[in-house]
Amino acid sequence: MTNGTFDALMERYRERRPFRPFEVELTTGERFTVEDPFAFGGRYGRGAYLASGGRMYLFDRTTLARIDGVSPESAE
């Protein structure tokens, strides 16, 4: 996945209307649910999510395993 493809995927999930929460799974097995589109984003092949409670998740195009239950390549 290129940086541009990653960025477009992040934007697609953040901008869908109506917004629906979705799950992100990293290659480490860690998972989190994005509940607020304004606290989630990606640019230059890197992503971040600031969860309620202040936990920050940082990831990139190489550590994203699944988004909304689908592998990034399948979501393109």
Image (cartoon, helix red, strand yellow):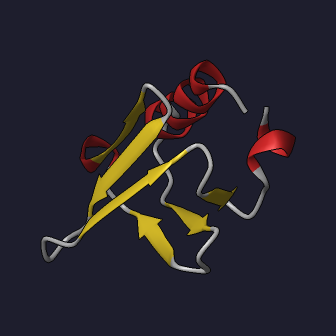
Outermost residue toward the right? 74
Q: Position of residue 36 (x, y in %)?
A: 31, 54
Outermost residue toward the top? 4
- Residue appearing at x 34%, y 45% in the figure: 37
Q: Position of residue 65 (x, y in %)?
A: 69, 61
- Residue appearing at x 59%, y 19% in the figure: 4
Task: Compare residues 41 and 3 and report the one nearer the observer.
Answer: 3
Task: Compare residues 15 and 61 and report the one nearer the observer.
Answer: 61
Q: Is residue 44 left or right of residue 7?
A: left
- Which image quadrant: the N terminus? top right
Q: Is residue 27 left or right of residue 55?
A: right
- Which image quadrant: the C terminus? top right
Compared with residue 9, is residue 20 higher up or lower down, i.e. above or below?
below
Outermost residue toward the front? 62
Compared with residue 53, is residue 65 higher up or lower down, i.e. above or below?
above
- Residue appearing at x 67%, y 26% in the figure: 2
Q: Is residue 13 left or right of residue 53?
A: right
Q: Position of residue 10 (x, y in %)?
A: 52, 36
- Residue appearing at x 59%, y 76% in the figure: 28
Q: Position of residue 25 (x, y in %)?
A: 60, 68
Q: Is residue 67 visible?
A: no
Q: Is residue 70 visible?
A: yes
